[in-house]
Amino acid sequence: MDMLMFELDKNATEPLYEQLYDAIKKGIVDGSIPVEKKLPSKRKLADFLMISQTTIELAYGQLLAEGYIVSKPRIGFFVEDIATLPYIDKAVVVPEEKPSAPRYDIDFSPGRIDTASFPFSTWRRYAKDAVDEQQQNLLLAGSAQGEYALRKEIASYLYQSRGVHCRPEQIVVGSGTEQLIPMILQILGDYNVYALENPGYQMTHHIIGQYGQRSLPIRIDDDGLDVTELEKSDANIAYVTPSHQFPTGAILSAPRRAQLLQWASYQANRYIIEDDYDSEFRYIGKPIPSLQGLDHQQKVIYLSTFSKSLMPSLRIAYFVLPEKLMPRYHALFTYYTCTVPRFEQHILAQFMRDGHFSKHLNRMRKIYRKKLEKLTEAIAQYDAVNISGEQAGMHVALTVKHDLTAAQLSTQAKAAYIRISPLSQYMLKEDARYDQHLLLGFGGIDEQCIAQTIETLFALWGLKKGEIAP
Amino acid sequence: MDMLMFELDKNATEPLYEQLYDAIKKGIVDGSIPVEKKLPSKRKLADFLMISQTTIELAYGQLLAEGYIVSKPRIGFFVEDIATLPYIDKAVVVPEEKPSAPRYDIDFSPGRIDTASFPFSTWRRYAKDAVDEQQQNLLLAGSAQGEYALRKEIASYLYQSRGVHCRPEQIVVGSGTEQLIPMILQILGDYNVYALENPGYQMTHHIIGQYGQRSLPIRIDDDGLDVTELEKSDANIAYVTPSHQFPTGAILSAPRRAQLLQWASYQANRYIIEDDYDSEFRYIGKPIPSLQGLDHQQKVIYLSTFSKSLMPSLRIAYFVLPEKLMPRYHALFTYYTCTVPRFEQHILAQFMRDGHFSKHLNRMRKIYRKKLEKLTEAIAQYDAVNISGEQAGMHVALTVKHDLTAAQLSTQAKAAYIRISPLSQYMLKEDARYDQHLLLGFGGIDEQCIAQTIETLFALWGLKKGEIAP
């Protein structure tokens, strides 16, 4: 074969060079153009097929780049031994329908917020403003720690609302607690033993396990973490939710706070991770200041998120490192890029700077307080049910006197399309004290419907007003 | 002390209950109200201070919640032993000025894109549309794998442009390669040995080390990864950039592709991670189809990003898992929340759905091709400098014949505020073949300035047109 005989269609939408490329490749793959065969010169093939030499050049160039042919300078192009390289057959992909998530008529899960009260128009204005021809360099990678403008707003907010003392330089912004905890683990190094609240936030337990580190469950009571049990344990790092324990809702008492900070001060490798996930919403008195603000020994890593205060789907969280851990952070994460889109960071920074965040929090606090009142009122009518952890946040714990366990009650509710989790789901180690406890998130329930939803749920469980259940 | 004597200022902006709370707390902290002291009853204190009982209730409630006092039912409130709990002194935080990043007059780093050509107005429209009162549930957490609407667009794009065969169900969206690689490592499990291209992408090396796994450097030549060296190594997972090797720009040839896929097929625990980071921009012929499209044995994990094709600051990347690894993904990441904001995901999904992404790519390809032409023209005038890796992407490799090494030339450039990195910076293991190589990213350089910037840089190095340097 001195020439390649192909039928090229000059009227096709596919460019000529692609048709030629496809035809030659097919020939090489199916063996009709044998290995080591010399291809016709560009000029000759162009004359023969009556097409331009550029077209041949493009086709040969592509084959060359993909390794189907090799070029021997001043001699020509030769077919390579492509061994078993198969031809890509372009079958049509038919995407399957997305399997729908389990649907609930009533959803008491703690992650839900009140979506109706979000300031859409304000947020939209800032979203629009962020995408700006005049600020082209926002398209490029920004600071690894997060935009300085945002960190500045966070530092000022934390100081005023949470008593946290920090400079913007100590703040690291990321896409959520799940993304930041692994970074904290790496900063703290290997061979640590983590004390986790029991019951507690499962995700932390999960991540620590994934990183091959050890964790120990420590019991919770009405004053929060049992620091005396912590003192007796091997743990050197305590992960706590002092402002509103997740999931029991307990508040870490002042003596316990002091005891915990003291525990940390006894050894150089001891640290406290303070997860302050929903401290913005406190309904009685003013918010309880953070552990970080009480700490004078650089023992507290403060961690928080905008998931509750703004929206879970925003994916913006942050931690505050003690100054002495900053060099370790810089050593480990030089190569890192902040995971939060810069547009999003600037929208939030402007929103905070112009006072909309405080306004939003004040508004939401009233809304959630109202919901909580309706909830406690509704529940108060049932002697079989006790409520706790209602001083703050967007969830409470229920204790239900019943022949069925909380887990069984949850299953019963699920069958009726009501989602409410037993506290046992958050246990790292079994503890019979919580067998009758359920976690009720009220953030996402319409205020007008609260009384009705509680009545529906409790009726389902066979509870009657003013009575102890069967 | 039977009563608490405080001066409360009814005209102050601080509410009375806060004044009272502050005063009592201060008294407890400084010891003027001793431990175990019984506080006056609410009624008595209210009468005494001539304020409402509610005010007292709020103050006591706060003190109670923070553990400064305890309540003994039917007896009263008592001061707790708060040990060393210090008072938070609210010093004013003065944020320091942000240290400015090192500035360059000319930046040839490979992460830079052409920002002037971004379709700001189109993107802004979609950004505005995404924040919509009618779609309140976009505020709540979405799919852990990423929004289905976006994964559908990615699947269709990948099929058409990259020959990747996948269903949206196989795609996992995340905030960048750095965030996704750790997930892939976890899916592949412990005790793997990773083969990395040398020179190659440092971040991967770094992450693998952080996860306590082993990596081996494998040499690169003009046809990409030396698969024969891989075959002789202990590695069971190969991390490759076949479409445009980073940083040399080599394209993995067809025989090598076949050899690599064959290598993977020999053992059950062998996999290939195909990082297709800038394959959208190919200047000669059409893009080279992905390894994933050639793989019929579910051996390829395909990884890509929108950092080059749209913008680095968007923080959206994704990987495509073989079907057989999906159960492992689901087992590991049930608890996970997708790290990309949902608004951002929907903006991108709509942008792609309406054809703007392809339009943008076609436009950018022309722009980058033009820049590349100017660059090669400018460089062609210097006999001392060779260019390679220019078939695709947004960077090329330069080989400079010079008494100074590439690293020294880079330092010299830096002193003149020009940023250009030696290839040695990307070496996992020393290899003298690259001592004279530099990486030149041209994406961010204005087309009109390219000739001038090259002239400036080369003059700085003492190169003269048409001459071999000193």
Image: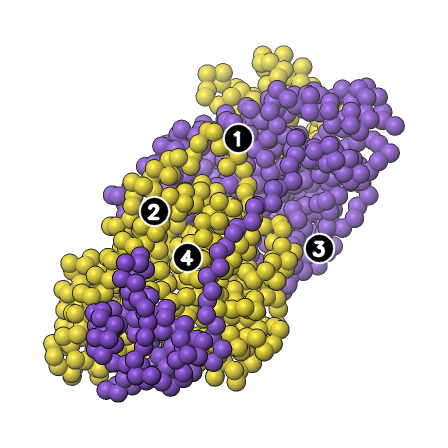
Chain colours: A yellow, B purple
Q: Which residue is disc 1 drawn over?
A: B115
Q: Residues within 10 Å of mark 4 (few under 14, many from 20)?
A: some
* Dot in front, 1 or 2: 2
The chain letter under disc 1 is B
Looking at the rendered structure, which numbered label has been put on residue A356?
2
Q: Earlier in the sequence, mark 4 or mark 2?
A: 4
Q: Nearer the viewer, residue A53 or A318?
A: A318
Which x, y percent locates residue A228?
47, 84
Which x, y percent locates residue B112?
59, 35
Give the residue type that dot 1 points to: Thr
Looking at the rendered structure, which numbered label has been put on residue B216?
3
Q: Residues within 10 Å of mark 1 (few under 14, many from 20)?
A: many
Q: Which residue is disc 4 drawn over?
A: A160
Quote the CA–CA distance across marks 1 and 4: 38 Å
Please check whether the numbered discs 1 and 3 fall on a single chain.
Answer: yes
Q: Locate residue B341 relative to residue B102 in the image: left or right.
A: left
Residue in the image at 52% along x and 27% along y: B116
Which x, y percent locates residue B416?
73, 32
